[in-house]
Image (tube, rainbow, N blue to C red):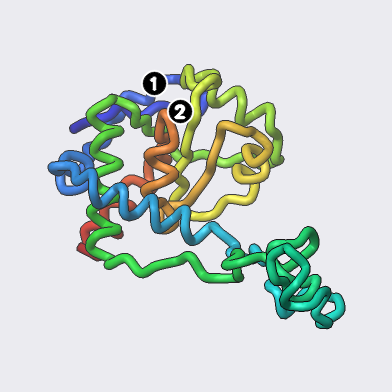
Amino acid sequence: MEVSVVKYSGEQTGKKVSLSDAVFAIEPNDHAIYLDVKSYLANQRQGTHKSKQRNEISGSSKKIKKQKGTGGARAGNIKNPQFKGGGRVFGPQPRDYSFKLNKKVKDLARKSALTYKAKDNAIAVIEDFNFETPKTKQYLNMLSALSLADKKTLLVLPESNKGVVLSGRNLKQAKITTADQINTYDVINADNVIFVESSVSKVENILNKES
């Protein structure tokens, strides 16, 4: 599959880049995508939720009434979970939600996600560029030139670029990543994926090398 390379100003360069079939035209595996997205979202969870159990509540441990003869149910102390202000039964405790996913499954998921974007013609390639001064307006002008101002976009850089990152980080629908940090969730979540020309080969080398 060939994609035309344009300048970040929207002008045609006359060049084309060939997308590898081994990365952008495989048989998509939906289950691999599901597992990788599930893993990514699980890894984002802090897992710091906590509720106090009966033994952690402040209060007297004295039995509040005698066991028999009151006509009501027997009860222990005021920290009983059945009473207001008592401890919680089986409440949430701090835990780690992350789980291991094999590299081959991750690679398959990323390839599958990129394949779907290629099938939907949702991949654009722009010539290597740099913003000397970080300006959000410059980044917005670039998206407008590509007719993507109202879309969720993922820009894939060959390596970290402070000027570009600072220019786009305040935009709600714009995400910026590097070739070695690209993940399935970001690809699937974006309406369009924008590759900087030199990042295409890097992504292909990474995914083919790790397969």
Residue 201 appears in the picture as rendered: no
Mark 2, other Cα within 10 Å: few <14 / some 14–19 / many ≥20: some
Pick out the residue farthest to the front: 69
Choose the circle earlier in sequence order: 2 or 1: 2
Relative to 185, 135 lies left or right: right
Displayed quadrant of residue 207: bottom left
Residue sitting at 72 percent across and 80 percent down?
55
Q: Position of residue 112 (x, y in %)?
A: 24, 44
The quarter of the image holding the C terminus is bottom left
Depth check: give the residue in front, 175 or 66: 66
Residue sitting at 18 percent across and 42 percent down?
28
Tag 1 residue:
12
Tag 2 residue:
7
Tell me the SS state at disc 1.
Answer: strand
Residue type at numbered disc 1: Gln
Residue sitting at 35 percent across and 69 percent down?
100
Relative to 84, 45 lies left or right: left
Residue type at numbered disc 2: Lys
